[in-house]
Image: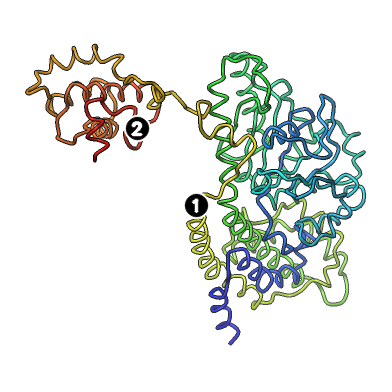
Amino acid sequence: MFRKNLKKDPELFQNVAEGLRRLYRTKLFPLEDTYRFHDFHSPALEDADFDNKPMVLLVGQYSTGKTTFIRHLMEQDFPGMRIGPEPTTDCFIAVMHGEQEGVIPGNALVVDPKKPFRKLNAFGNAFLNRFMCAQLPNPVLESISIIDTPGILSGEKQRISRGYDFAAVLEWFAERVDRIILLFDAHKLDISDEFSEVIRALKNHEDKMRVVLNKADQISTQQLMRVYGALMWSLGKIINTPEVVRVYIGSFWAQPLLVPDNRKLFEAEEMDLFLDIQSLPRNASLRKLNDLIKRARLAKVQAYIISSLKKEMPSMFGKEAKKKELIANLGEIYTRIEKEHQISPGDFPNLAKMQELLNGQDFTKFAALKPKLLEAVEDMLANDIARLMAMVRQEEASVPSQSVKGGAFEGTMSGPFGHGYGEGASEGIDELEWVVGRDKPTYDEIFYTLSPINGKVSGAAAKKEMLKSKLPNTVLGKIWKLADVDKDGLLDDEEFALANHLIKVKLEGHELPPSLPEHLVPPSKRMSAQEA
């Protein structure tokens, strides 16, 4: 009867967030609670964790432009904001939407059930006194929330003086945010010990990580190449993955570029980063689903580890000695569980950290293996998650335009300062004359060498000429479709000139338009194109 109900549950979900919440409460939480998942890995999830807006976490050494970056995105100051060359931001500031501008201190913030921060109270007063929420009415914050963090310092002294585990707090945020942006200053590439520790703490969240090389307008192109290479080399030593981290290069503030040589590069990079951030609301449900799956896999491994340790403990004497022996041989227990239950080595928690945490635990109070709890999680992963995945797609389709709006995101959307305006296929968009006409005399000379009949050249004749561009057939085929405006399988002099213009656009590194823009339609075809 119990199994039957489990199968029917997903059909009752109203939306993905409610589905995730109920699956967590009914199937995953009991397993976590039984095998002390919250003592070892991460606090239990709250309802607000499933309902909150996408969050962006900014991390970087002091004076890399984190707070300025937020101000640039929102085009507005926020309460508690301090900017300067010295380590100014000494607090974690959650910048969120609110009808009234104001600040909520950390101790009040962690008792608010509507905010996803309740479990941060575990880090104590030293942290809570350095945590606040800045609320303000801003269109960007209607879609996302942004977490500003204290600048990361170097040296043992500063780390101790924080009074709380900085890396652990960042790891807590990393589990719950949708995007982690690591900021670097083009002038200060040294990665301090604390920053290295922080990046390693974010190890399991590489998929959320993006890197910004900020203040890149302050150095020349040659220096920028060297700085970029040095950054990639430094990151490669800390982030041990075969994939290269995506690095966005630019100057993320609203001031004139000091060295404008790389303006086009900076514009393209900023556009890419903005598009990445704008996609977060649309992909938020999928991210939460993905994080729940990751959590469930770790919870299963935790159950196998704890129950194995319980099984090995003697019932009467020598408990302390056996505990020490088991902790020392934890690596062998990992290997045994891996083989016995066909679990990937990547699903196991860090060995040294697990051994350290186990030292403070009473093994006699550990729970034995309860197959029903594991079966419920297996059923969730095998059946419920698949149904929720289908719901995610339905929700995305029903709100296709959901993205971040307002602030700096509006400045590059349209008009002459939109990305790519007046370039490539958009060249001549606001001119009265047909832009292709400028080079038409040159194209006409070639056209008349192809022996046109009744003022048109055949596809075979045009093909020979177009192949000289060395572009692949797939691209030339698209150019032909765009240029053959009247779809008669032949090209007249204007269509031939248009084909050559589009070849030039592609050879200059621009993309072809999906359909022919109005300003590129040959003058003699404009009336017929409008009628069609």
Quadrant position of the C terminus in the picture: top left
Name above or below for residue 441 compared with residue 505.
above
Give the left or right position of residue 282, taking residue 37 as reference: left
Who's the residue at 63% across and 27% down the image? 233
Quadrant position of the N terminus in the picture: bottom right
Residue 400: numbered disc:
1
Say few, some or many: other residues with alpha carbon within 10 Å of mark 1 (under 14 / 14 to 19 / 20 or more): few
Residue 476 vs residue 33, the one in the foreground: 476
Who's the residue at 40% across and 25% down the image? 429
Q: Amino acid at mark 1?
A: Pro
In the structure shown, which secondary structural element does the residue marked by tag 2 occupy? loop
Residue 296 at x, y percent in the picture: 64, 63
Q: Can you see residue 427? A: yes
Who's the residue at 57% across and 72% down the image? 379
Alpha carbon distance from label 1 to label 2: 24 Å
Residue 98 vs residue 268, the one in the foreground: 98
Name above or below for residue 100 compared with residue 197.
below
In which quarter of the view is residue 526 placed?
top left
